[in-house]
Image (cartoon, helix red, strand yellow):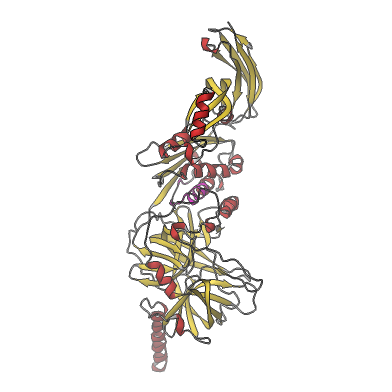
Amino acid sequence: MKFLRLPLALLAAACAAAAALAQPADAPVLPLDELQPGMKGEVWTVFRGRDSESFQVEVKGVLRNALGPGKSLILCELTDPRVQPMGAVAGMSGSPLYIGGRLAGVLSYQIQRFETVRYAGFTPIADMLEVSALPATRPAPASPLPIPVRSERQADNSTSSTRATPALPGADFQPFAPVFSIGGISPQVAALMAPQFAALGLSAVALGGNLGHAAAEPPATALPELKPGGVVAAALAVGDITMAAGGTVSHVDGNRVLAFGHPLMTLGATEVPMAEAEIVAILPSSLNSIKVSNTGRVIGAFSQDRLSGIYGEIGRMPRLVPVEISLPARLNRQNLKFSVVQHEMLLPAIAATGLTQAVIGSNEAGLTRGFRLRASVEYAGRAPVEFSQLYPGPQGFTQGVAEVTATLQQWLFNPYERTFPERIRFSVEETADTPVGYVEVFQVSRTQAAPGETLTASVNWRGFQAEKFNETFTIPVPADWTGRQLEIVLATGSQLDELAGRPRSLGVHQLRNFDEYLGMLRDERPTDGLYLAVLERATLFTDQTARTVELPGSFERIARGTDAARYQSRAAAVVLWERHVLPGRLFNTNLRRPLQVTD
């Protein structure tokens, strides 16, 4: 027994020494100029769970200025037999490289994909330490164009890119593209939203999970002690719906953390939740091996997203936008609550993902006949922006989910004021039957009328798989319509908006401030039901949002000569009278009847 105890004790001591080496937060730095080909190193990362392990590499050399002037890349061969078959894995990015007990760099770049001997690129540690010294200024506004997030060069004076351009076949190297795992949604929803995220330049997979923490609030328990080689996540959404990219801790100085060794999305100065994570498995692939993980509670915030890595602090909670989705009680489904980063393009896409999950991501049958979606975007010190939309069932919603995302993007991006909502609320209300209607007959009692008379408009319509109905509406004829060539129109709210010359989009020069922008959004007519309206064709002269009918030509020429971008003239229709009829149904109708008012 004594013979057995000694080796076990020695083994325990060796394991303890190895564990201490695994996370040397205060390890000295190995300068780049001291690196020599043939040096052996250890890279620490998490293969499963949360405990880090090492694998062996051999330094092949340094590619000087490979990433730009003064930005070099350490080239290493992955000699460890565990790693050689799978290569460098997405999620290993940021794994620290130690040579002789000194910190040399962090794993950050894939070298080729189908090579017979696996290599990887490492960012020199000095470049990563630069990131922690950069000023934490406010995030720069996103581009007003729906371009991929990865293409946002010079965001907050950052000149980096998240993806290197391949040079020659067989000599490709590129930073690890962050793989964002989405938790809390079904594969069906993930497939439906994939084009939305692809348009933003994000690689997202549904094979991810979350540990059920409502992580927008400060942790109730003690904060963890992150160590180099450990796993960490940069999250875009936390709560019931999570979207996060897992990576590896590169360097720790107190509560200051460096990770990834490459950009997340090249956001520059930013505010992204730092979350705990655990690795469930590694999925090997000759094309691109990835780690599959669960996202845990928020423990801090990343404030820098730069070429050489991301930097953040444990214990500092990020500013996020809460999203709440309430569902009918009859469905017996959980109302969803999650929080999303303050980004004009990401926030709408992720909010729409949670909404899609609420509508179609359940085994329970519900909402099959139709539902009304109400949305409210709440800004501090201002009345909320609200809209209501009917859908004839989940299928109709899936076809229009891109439109929902675009509507939210329109609400959240504005060129006037750097602001984000305090909260976004969605409410899904079930309808008694399928809210679709069909107009079969539209008649007006007369096409000529005298001032003071009343016209009658008759609408024969039927619902979906329902009986016919007849509705009669009266139209007053005031004296000031005399002598005008008019039209009586039965159309949807959006069609009437278009007929009346309401532009689908406005240039920056056409509005004065954010409040006018919100007013424009509130001014849209409802999309359900129909509008019975009397129109007169005219020329509209617009000064930003103010409109004048038939402005004298001399005034128009003077104004447009002063500022042609601000003052516009176009043919449209003036709405003299209107009434919203048959609400609660979706129609596709645009019918017109002439009207002449004579003495």
Q: Is residue 409 magenta?
A: no
Residue 312, relative to residue 395: is it above or below?
below
Res. 423 image quadrant: top left
- Spot occupied by residue 47 in the image (x, y as percentages of width and height): 50, 73
| 233 is higher (above) or lower (below) than 2 | above
Residue range of the region highlighted in magenta in the rendering? 334-352
Q: Is residue 350 magenta?
A: yes
Q: For this rendering, which residue is in front, 309 or 205?
A: 309
Q: Is residue 334 visible?
A: yes
In this view, the residue farthest toward the bottom is 3
Q: Which residue extends farthest top? A: 599
| The N terminus - image quarter | bottom left
Q: Looking at the picture, tell me which residue is in the foreground, 250 or 193.
A: 250
Q: Position of residue 556 (x, y in %)?
A: 52, 27
* Residue 183 image position (x, y, % from top left): 50, 56
Of residues 563 and 252, the one drawn nearer to the viewer in this rendering:
563
528 vs 280: above or below: above
Total numbered badges shown on the rendered structure = 0
Residue 454, percent from left and from top:
55, 9
Give the side of residue 235 with respect to residue 196, left or right.
left
In the rendered image, is residue 582 in sight?
no
Position of 166 relative to 205 (above/below): below
Q: Quadrant of the C terminus?
A: top right
